[in-house]
Image (cartoon, coloured by chain):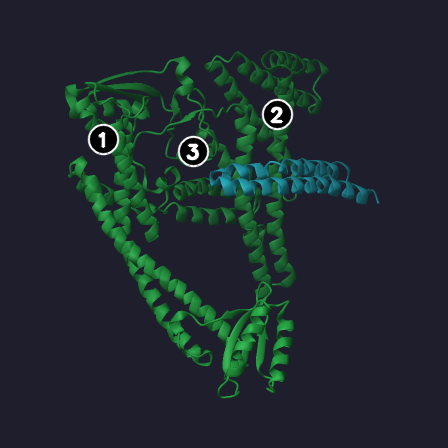
Chain colours: A cyan, B green
Amino acid sequence: MEKAIIALAAALAVGIPAVATAYAQAKIGSAGAGTVAEKPETAGTIIILEAIPETMVILGFVVAIMLILQFA
Amino acid sequence: MIRKMVRLALWGVTGKRREIIEELHRLGVLHLEQEGSRSAGESVRLNTLRLLRGKTLGLLESLGWDGWTALSEESINDAEKLLSSLPSEEFAPEIEKSLEEFGKRLSSLLDERTAADDLLLRAKKARDTLERFSSFLRRDAGPSDTAMVWLIPENTVQQALGALHAAFSARGETWEGRHHFVPGKDFLGVLALRVSPELEEEASEILSRWKALPWSLPEFCSGARLEDALPVLGKKIENLSDRLQAITGDLRRASAEWGPRLAALFLFIDARTEQAAVEARLDPSADTFTLHGWIPEDALEPTVSALKDRFGEDVLLQWRHPGEKEWSSVPTSLKNSPLSSPFELFLKLLRPPSYSGIDPTTAVALFFPFFSGCMIGDMGYGVLILLLSLKLKKAVRPLLRDVGSIFLSVSLWSIVWGAAWGEFFGDAGHRLFHLEPLWVERSVSVLPVVVFTVALGAAHVFFGLLLGIYQGIRNRHRHLWMEKAGNLTVLLALVAGLIVLKAELPRGVFTVPLSLLVIGLALLIAGGGIGGIIETLGSIGNIISYVRIAAIGLSSAILALVASKFLDVFGLSVFGIFLALMIHLLNFVLAIGGSGLHSARLHYVEFFGKFYSGNGKEYTPFQRRSGSSWKKQS
């Protein structure tokens, strides 16, 4: 039971930031597509901006790993 | 490395100004800075050249030629030699005359193609419409019946059919089999009728009342009955298709033959236009003229020699190094070793570094492939990327060759890291050749890899902060270097504190990190105030962000393991092998895309943020445009 709760906590630690990241990337993606249509030379910058919210899920991953390694 | 620049001033005799400007353009190293308004006479010449340039480009676009990257320097130089032999006042009318003649021939061909295209489209539409009624039209009816086709709104068709039915009945004619309706697009359907000559007028009146429009055959079928029109249309379509094919062939041949010549001509006129634009700003009534701009120090001597050799006493040249106050206006030109210069590509996404700033290309060349390789970390994928890079390095486009060089570095590091993690297409290496990791198996021992990547991040961020301190001291920005130094000291204090805690060192040692923290905070507040403290918190986040190297690497390793699992489940069957290959293909694409994107991001956000000031001016020497760059700049 305890292991299941730890696994759930780890899943939530990754899952919730993943949803948040997806939401942010969707917003950036749609705005970025418009920007690239207007100014194709901004494509590189937009790709980088698109990758920025992934920090959230990376940090979530760290928390999940720590939870599993510490308590499981 | 940012090249040292020199301010060059040139005084010349006005009578020689055109030749001097041409020579400067040929040398292609001076970043001109010009002031003054255009003189009227020169503007006329400039406008003539611009018009010619536009016409040439228009012809090229009409030809549909786009072989800029394959355009050889030889053909450009040949065109230049040929046209340069004409006196400069004469070549413009000559070229204009030739262009007009060529343009006329081309436009008649293009007009013919447009007309044939239009006819073909109409013929096909007519055929499609008639084909829907072919069986209805062929069906036996009264020998004197006339076939009619009408376009009618779908919402009025029932009323129209009712009215027609009544009219047929009133005359004692059968209604069944005399009409056929096909719904169409946009609520407009097509109605075909067979009516006797007596009813023709009345039927037309009824249909017009219900907002129907008569449909008729294209004019090239005039005289043909609807029932007999299909073969006529088929023949016409065949003829038109043949004609279009012939015109397209002619245009393709014309494009292959004349495209490179016109492109070389365009580049020649473009060069002359650029030169005329510079000339137009000089005062033609004065005895001498002045030009000034920036030139890389390493190109100064050959430039001065070339100008002196050709013009002797007709030019006077003076140069000096920029003063500290001028640094913001000096253009930035980068020069790196052949190994690291492909990585200048990453700076092209940003504004160039300021002249007094730091060129991070070498650092990117070192860290980018290292991080990317660490994420991919598979010898098999590394070999595939190596093959891809060798292919790309042979490409014609310089951009693709640069990407090839970057891939080459990434592939080598991928192989090295693959050996460290013991991965060759996931665990296929272990299964086939008993490959063992030189360090750890990253899909099992996650924590050491996470710790390693955080340490890597700390080293990278510390290096960025050191560069920031260096830049601050060099540019005498006290606040900048103090803030960066404070940031670095606080981070070092935290690292030292962690070491003391983890290593369970005597409590007395704790004074070292504590002292560092106090010094760091003092520097931070002195350099950047409260904002400095916030930046330190950001730096901690930056360091943790490097965990993505472990995270992405882990996902890549696990996906590769999944591919092997398919073989376990399905055995060495075609399906199992196919699924395993598909998963590896997906993983390979994700590995290249993800590792490149995230490595780039670590550089742009985490590393560059510590020192890079992209407020430089781009070095744009006065020179002939390369074939591939005309479109973006014109």
The answer to whether residue A23 is visible is yes
Earlier sequence position, callout 2 versus callout 1? 1
Instruction: Identify the image quadrant of residue B275.
Output: top left
Extreme residue toward the right, this view: A1
Chain name for mark 2: B
Q: What residue does disc 1 label? A: B22
- Rounded to the nearest whole Å, what is the CA distance between mark 1 and mark 3? 30 Å
Residue B206 in the image, given as x and y percentages of width and height = 58, 73
Dot 2: what SS?
A: helix
Earlier sequence position, callout 1 versus callout 3? 1
- Local packing at callout 1 (Cα closer than 10 Å; few below 14, some 14-19, many 20+) is some
**Who is closer to the viewer here, B440 or B176?**
B176
Residue at x 71% of width, y 17% of height? B506
For residue B633, what is the image quadrant?
top left
| Label pair 2/1, CB-CB below 8 angstroms | no
Task: Name the mark on residue B539.
Answer: 2
Q: CA distance from mark 3 to mark 2?
A: 25 Å
Q: Earlier in the sequence, mark 3 or mark 2?
A: 3
Residue marked by disc 3: B344
